[in-house]
Image (cartoon, helix red, strand yellow):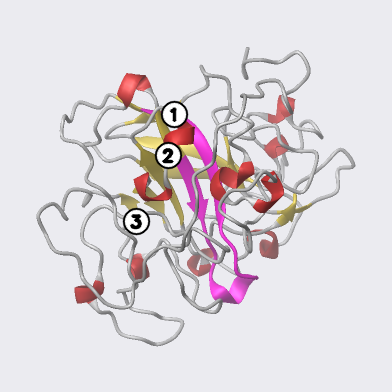
Amino acid sequence: MLFALTLALGLSGQASAHIALWHPSMFGFNASSDNNRPVDPLMGRHFNTSDEHDSWWYHGHLIYPPHENDIMQLPVGGALNAELSCDKGTTSWWPSAPGGNTASVDQPDYPCPGQPLSQFHTTAANDTGGCALAVAYKSNAWEVKPEDFAVFSVNQTCVWTKNTTFPVPANMPPCPNGKCQCAFFWGHQADSGSAQIYMNGFQCNMDGATNDQPLPPPNPARRCGEDIYLNRPADPSNCTIGAKQPNYWHNLEGNNQFEDIMEPPSYQALYGFMDGAQTDLYDGVGKTQPTGSQGSASKRSLPTEPPRVWGHRRMLGQTHEGR
């Protein structure tokens, strides 16, 4: 489900919302005043333009970086507990939310309190497309390319609860200079809304990493598992071997998935992802990937780094979340 809901709770307290993984290390953590908030879906956009509303890469939020000291620490061999919500006001970071604290006593672990399941595009826990965390081993987000991101953790019942666990493989290499670039992705099933993806970028670090073997280049995931929706058998020979890229889909540029809108890519076994830590990241080393219907990504250009706007859209007088 890297995809869609429609508005998070605002100053009015009304909401028609989508989902984001909230953390101060997020690019665009306080982008809340227009229709390009972190929770908004991404579809039909260019890879990168001067208009943040027309750029899907990093949700158009590269120009709104987190404070340099806000880094998500990922416990290697452990698990990250992430907070997913339609509204930052329901999370631990509510002091910087436009509407303040909107957490629900009656629905403490529901991602969108007071709203129906349709707000995060599912009908039940077994009707989710799953969420993924991916990492790029570059300290500067402006140098990251889509093919740099490798999915290292998947939660296949995401989005279903606000508090969502993402196990981290024990053999992750350390980040250069203590900082990598990570991203959260999700996508929903075809029966639960329009075709879209979701992406939020983060600064991150692999805490406790000791493996000195670089992560191998990831490849696009391939449709290879049993398709219970279209009644198609599994084809293990078509699975991508080893590290996989996130699913980039249904935008004007930069896609690595080209399925019809009724066959959205997911982070399920259908695309060769396992639930939890992706322990197969090195399995593709020295092996030949399958060939077939998987096409090459559509053309896109990398963004050009503008002056960094540290203060824009951050809470007044706030420079480091949590101080």
Q: As shown in the figure, which amino acid type bears the numbered disc 3? A: Asp
Image location (x, y in percent) of residue 109? 60, 45
Q: Identify the residue shown where x is 24% and y is 32%.
A: 173
Of the image marks 3 and 2, the number of the one nearer the N terminus: 2
Which residues, given as a range, are shown in magenta? 183-205
Q: As shown in the figure, which amino acid type bears the numbered disc 2? A: Val
Residue 43 drawn above or below residue 171: below
Q: As shown in the figure, which amino acid type bears the numbered disc 1? A: Asn
Instruction: Report the residue marked by disc 3.
Output: 275
What is the quadrant of the C terminus in the image? top right
Q: Looking at the picture, tell me which residue is in the foreground, 145 or 187.
A: 145
Q: Looking at the picture, tell me which residue is in the foreground, 273 or 124.
A: 273
Task: State the CA–CA distance, disc 1 to disc 3.
Answer: 29 Å
Q: Which mark is residue 124?
A: none
Query: Does residue 55 appear anywhere in the picture?
Result: yes
Q: Identify the residue shown where x is 57% and y is 63%.
A: 251
Image location (x, y in percent) of residue 18? 67, 53
Task: State the CA–CA distance, disc 1 to disc 2.
Answer: 7 Å
Q: Classify residue 293 by image quadrant.
A: bottom left
Of the image marks 1 and 3, the number of the one nearer the N terminus: 1
The extreme left residue here reads: 286
Q: Are marks 1 and 3 in contact (CB under 8 Å)?
A: no
Instruction: Report the residue marked by disc 1.
Output: 140
Q: Identify the residue shown where x is 69% and y is 37%.
A: 88
Local packing at callout 3 (Cα closer than 10 Å; few below 14, some 14-19, many 20+) is: some
Image location (x, y in percent) of residue 71? 47, 24
Instruction: Report the residue marked by disc 2.
Output: 144
